Image (cartoon, rainbow, N blue to C red):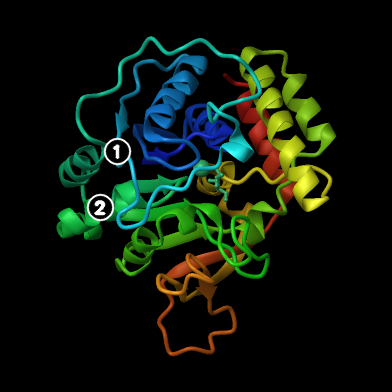
Amino acid sequence: TRKIIIDTDPGQDDAVALLLALASPELEVLGITCVAGNVPLDLTARNARVVCELAGRSDLPVFAGCDRPMERALVTAEYVHGKTGLDGIALPLPRMKLQERHAVDFLIETLRAEPPGSVTLCPLGPLTNIATAFARAPDIKERVAEIVLMGGGFFEGGNVTPTAEFNIYVDPQAADIVLRAGVAVVMMPLDVTHKALTTRARIEAFRNLGTPVGHAVASWTDFFERFDMAKYGSEGAPLHDPCVIGYLLQPDLFSGRHINVAVETQSELTMGMTVADWWRVSPRKPNAMFMRDVDAAGFYALLTERLGRL
Ligand code: BDR
Ligand code: CA
């Protein structure tokens, strides 16, 4: 099994990613660290626990982390995810407690305690917690096995500004620190996630699982779709964050290139843009596996089969 820490700001698609991880015996989730992003921190930390309880995993440690980006003011996305961040279905408030330790302390202490190169980080929101941990404890960088993250976009354009994807836009300084850390990074940008669309048939397949988890996932993706379909005019909405977990389970579903990716942190016009050197025309060294394609049918088959186990 592979040890992972999921850093997240749930978010319906974050919630589906968490469920996919919890349904998969190949992965051992050491903890869930929450960050401010789609909605403020108190809500993301609550939503992560709602999802754990839905999966019957109230034993999992959930930590609250940074409540705002490193330098900029917090930007949230209630217009996509609803007021709670998990709109679409009413689920019970969590009974499990939040851990007392700060998420950044958990990240640092866990990476120091586990064997070097054995823990994979899976950021599904702004990179504030991860960058703060790297800045505070630079020794942990070389202990990370790999970072597999959802964020960025280049050919597809941005979803929050014409050039920026939400997770990177919210905390570009953090993204810059992570991409320059010298750690192996795999990126799932909009270029991939906009090819993993929730069609009607795929949402029905979740519903047809006939379980509380299947029902919740169908309701969330239905909610998400109403907003995203109107925005993109596509059949179905992108299901971003589960691509990260899908990659851990079946990497051959995805393809891309190992290239340099740099983050714009200065220009207000293109703030948070992930400049991907796809044609390797800059002297900058490759620092990330930038994914661009996904076998969407294979991905949804995997996701649906796994959710059926919960
Ligand atoms: C990302 O932003 C959030 O709204 C989603 O949860 C996803 O992580 C997509 O841009
Ligand atoms: Ca997210």
Is 229 or 40 nearer to us in this picture? 40
Callout 2: 10 Å neighbours few (<14), some, many (20+)? many
In the picture, the quarter occupied by the C terminus is top right
Residue at point 20%, 54% (across, down): 140
Q: Looking at the picture, does residue 183 appear above or below residue 11?
A: below
Is 13 or 117 nearer to us in this picture? 13
Residue 63 position, x and y percent, is: 30, 30
Residue 13 position, x and y percent, is: 58, 37
Find out if the beta carbon at label 2 lies less than 8 Å from the nearest ligand 2 atom.
Answer: no
In the picture, the quarter occupied by the N terminus is top left
Residue on which the image places disc 1: 65
Residue at point 23%, 56% (across, down): 134
Q: Secondary structure at mark 1?
A: loop
Alpha carbons under labels 2 and 1: distance apart: 10 Å
**Horizontal side of residue 91 vs 262, given as left or right:** right
Q: Secondary structure at mark 2?
A: helix
Check disc 1 and give the amino acid type: Gly
Check disc 2 and give the amino acid type: Thr
Residue 215 position, x and y percent, is: 68, 18
Residue on which the image places disc 2: 132
Find out if the beta carbon at label 1 lies less than 8 Å from the nearest ligand 2 atom.
Answer: no
Residue 157 position, x and y percent, is: 65, 65
Q: Looking at the picture, does residue 13 appear above or below residue 218?
A: below
Residue at point 36%, 48% (across, down): 120
Contact check, label 2 and label 1, Cβ < 8 Å: yes
Q: How many marks?
A: 2
Q: Looking at the picture, does residue 227 appear above or below residue 127?
A: above
Q: Quadrant of residue 96?
A: top left
